[in-house]
Amino acid sequence: MFASYEVALLLASKKKPFTDAKEIIKPSLKIAARMLGNKKYETKFDHIPLSNNTMARRVEELVAES
């Protein structure tokens, strides 16, 4: 779950749309896992919540904390 906060912070700081999480970041993680040759990483990366709603909620939570 911590990773989804990091992704949300990255997208918000770069002023990128939250859809980038599912459309760019998630596929990139799958590529990285395949290149590492470890199926366990691919499974872990698949469980990172990166939906638009989740990203928006994470950013709201991060703003509320600061």
Image (cartoon, rainbow, N blue to C red):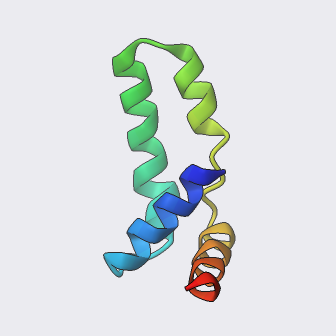
Q: Is residue 2 toward the left or the right of residue 11 in the image?
A: right
Q: Nearer the viewer, residue 35 or 59?
A: 59
Percent coordinates x, y for residue 37 in the rendering: 41, 12
Percent coordinates x, y for residue 60 in the rendering: 63, 83
Q: Nearer the viewer, residue 9 or 65?
A: 65
Percent coordinates x, y for residue 4 in the rendering: 58, 56
Tally of marks: 0
Q: Residue furthest top?
A: 37
Residue 32, placed above or below residue 56: above
Tell me what residue is drawn at x 37 percent, y 30 percent.
32
Residue 61 quadrant: bottom right
Q: Nearer the viewer, residue 31 or 56?
A: 56
Residue 11 quadrant: bottom left
Q: Is residue 61 toward the left or the right of residue 11 in the image?
A: right
Tell me what residue is drawn at x 53 percent, y 24 percent.
41
Residue 13, placed above or below residue 40: below
Tell me what residue is drawn at x 56 percent, y 62 percent.
5
Residue 25, placed above or below residue 58: above
Q: Residue furthest front?
A: 66
